[in-house]
Amino acid sequence: MTNAFISVIPALLCITFHELSHGYVAYRLGDNTAKDAGRLTLNPIKHIDIMGLLMMLVARFGWAKPVPINMNNFKNPKAGMAITALAGPVSNIILAAIIFLIYGLSAGALAAAGELGITISYMLYTTAYLSCALAVFNIIPIPPLDGSKVLFSLLPEDKYYKLMRYERYGFIILLIIVSTDKLSPYLTTVTEAVFGGLAVISQWAYTLTL
């Protein structure tokens, strides 16, 4: 099993959870757009953005193909968009917490499993870390990331819709910022803080097996 494979599987899992959560929450709030587009699925192929996936593998920060959402289908468009946007990062934090729980409960068995145990442990570690990294990256308040949708929802109606019209240009700005690598140290610091905070779950879970 190659290192590339060990990294790709966790990345696909994190991306799929993130985008599926966006689509599912939007669906629950009254928007069928993602469902009609076939995006309410655990099939990672439906959610992959090749550049975003490569960034996750190389830089540990990346993105997926955005789930289509029509905010006009929400009873409260601004609130619906904010809740739907938050669903992605929150789902990644929950996923990381679940992974830590699984690791803590299985740590003894993994330690006794030799090379296979080491491989599985690394995959669990990578999944938890990438999930935290994806959550942190997406709360950056630059369009089209989730953080911008939450921040914009706090603005008055006229300013909100005006800014949303320029959302497509935010991606260009984001690519420029990411390419300069200026954000990486800050993103890494925050990601490691979140990762470390959630890691106590595995320690607690391990004590249950003693």
Image: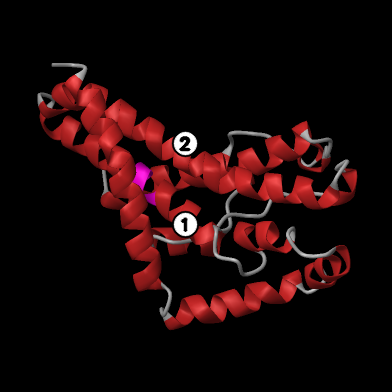
Judged left or right of residue 37, residue 14 is left
* Closer to us: 38 or 136: 136
**Any part of residue 116 in sight:** yes
The reply to whether residue 6 is visible in this rendering is no
Place of residue 25 in the rendered image (x, y in percent of width and height, measured from the top left):
70, 37
Residue drawn at (65%, 63%), measured in percent from left and top?
A: 148
Q: Which quadrant, please, contains the C terminus?
A: top left
The quadrant holding residue 191 is bottom left
Q: In the structure shown, which secondary structural element does the residue marked by tag 1 occupy?
A: helix
How far apart are the alpha carbons under marks 1 and 2?
Answer: 13 Å
Residue drawn at x 64%, y 72% is: 171
Query: Can you say whether 187 is above or below 14 in the image?
Result: below
Look at the image and say whether residue 129 sits in the magenta stretch: yes
**Residue 181 in which image quadrant:** bottom left
Q: Position of residue 3 (x, y in %)?
A: 27, 50
Q: Nearer the viewer, residue 15 or 139?
A: 139
Q: Which residues are magenta?
A: 126-130
Residue 63, position in %: x, y?
54, 58
**Quadrant location, the N terminus:** top left
Amino acid identity at mark 2: Ile
What type is the residue that disc 1 sits on?
Val
Disc 1 target residue: 136
Q: Main secondary structure of the magenta part?
A: helix
Instruction: Determine whether, in the image, residue 159 is placed left or right of residue 88.
Output: right
Q: Quadrant of residue 114?
A: top left
Characterize the local packing of mark 2: few (<14), some (14-19) or many (20 or more) Cα atoms within 10 angstroms. Answer: some
**The one of 38 and 204 positioned closer to us in this rendering:** 204
- Please tell me which of labels 1 and 2 falls first in the chain: 2
Does the magenta segment cover residue 109? no
Task: Give x and y (percent) for residue 113.
Answer: 13, 25
Q: Which residue is mark 2?
A: 94
Q: Is residue 147 left or right of residue 82?
A: left
